[in-house]
Image: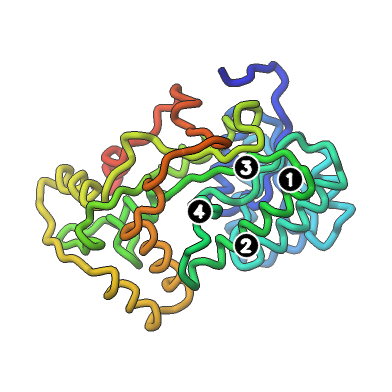
Amino acid sequence: MEKESNKKSRVLIVGATGFIGRKIARASLAAGHPTSLLHRPDMKPREIEKVQTLLQLKATGARLIPVSFDDHPGLVKAVSEADVVISALNGPTMASLQLKLVDAIKEAGNVKRFLPSEFGTDPSRMAHAIAPGNAVFIDKMEVRKAIEQACIPFTYISANFYMAYSVANLAQLEKLFPPRESVVLYGDGNIKSIYLDEDDVATYTIKTIDDPRTLNKTVYLRPPENILSQREVVEEWEKLIGKELHKTSISAHDFLALIPEKELPDQIGIAHFYHFFYEGCLANFEIGEGSEEASILYPEVNYTRVGDYLKRYL
């Protein structure tokens, strides 16, 4: 059973204006946790949408804490007022900023749980990843090493594949809506992946933070009905629209050959898709000792199924 307590842990979220960060913030507030959001005090006019996100979260009960990552005493003070720190940072500075956060958590000495910015593929299983997609896994492992060397209590969340980037577009690169005429399959389209609604990622994440079963462990999000092949995802869409799509296939060799002609963000996407859809890296292993599976720990979560997620695109 999940630990029950009348007193909810105080949660500090870093990166709450990002795609997954804002959902984790909402889930924390919905679960009744006193929730603070750390943000840069020098946000620019071009970041107006991020500011609006912060203000919307503040209106629903979040506390805003303006602190620069260059302000070590300020960081220490911010984390010292929290029981749980969750990082949802992303981008090229993710590792360097999180290492500053680790230093602050270590000095504060009171944080009961740190969840670094993972929320995707388990980086400990991706030492073989191809460039340039390997950079994010290297960065995440650097942060893990610092956390464990500092003896900071942790939980790592492996959330696999966000539906917005995989189900919504039937895994078609550079698209965000599902096609209605044709679809490209990776290989035979039968390799299994694991798909998560981003709101479910947030719900499961918040459930772990006070659970002693998840302390110093990796929690894999593997809702069983969402372990599907690309072909099966396509079939879910075909059932909804009452039409069979024209299907073509691209080999692994031809797919990787696309990398040199693309911009860096798309090169990273191709590298990751190769591991997902040709290797099956998300679902081709058993969860071992030192890890837990979220849908087993929290069977009460009525997670979103792939077919239900796709209905919003009709």
Seen at 24% across and 69% down, the residue is 251
Q: Residue lying farthest right?
A: 73
Rendered image: mark on residue 217: none
- Give neighbour class at mark 1: few <14, some 14-19, many 20+ (Cα, 10 Å): some
Seen at 41% across and 67% down, the residue is 271
- Residue 287 versus residue 314: which sits nearer the camera? 287
**Quadrant (top left, top right, bottom left, bottom right) of the N terminus:** top right
Kindly indicate whether the residue at mark 1 contacts the one at mark 4 (C-beta within 8 angstroms): no
- Whole-number angstrom distance, CA of label 1 to CA of label 3: 9 Å
Q: Is residue 252 visible?
A: yes
Task: Name the residue type under label 1.
Answer: Leu
Mark 2 or 4, closer to the camera? 4
SS assignment at label 1: strand
From the image, tell me which residue sits under label 3.
Answer: 57
Quadrant position of residue 62? top right
Rendered image: mark on residue 125: 4
Question: Where residue 29 appears, x then y in whole percent?
Answer: 62, 33
From the image, tell me which residue sits under label 1.
Answer: 64
Kindly indicate whether the residue at mark 3 contacts the one at mark 1 (C-beta within 8 angstroms): no
Rendered image: mark on residue 139: 2
Seen at 52% across and 66% down, the residue is 134
| First of labels 4, 1 by sequence position | 1
Task: Name the residue type under label 4.
Answer: Arg
Task: Name the residue type under label 3.
Answer: Leu
Mark 3 or 2, closer to the camera? 2
Mark 2 or 1, closer to the camera? 2
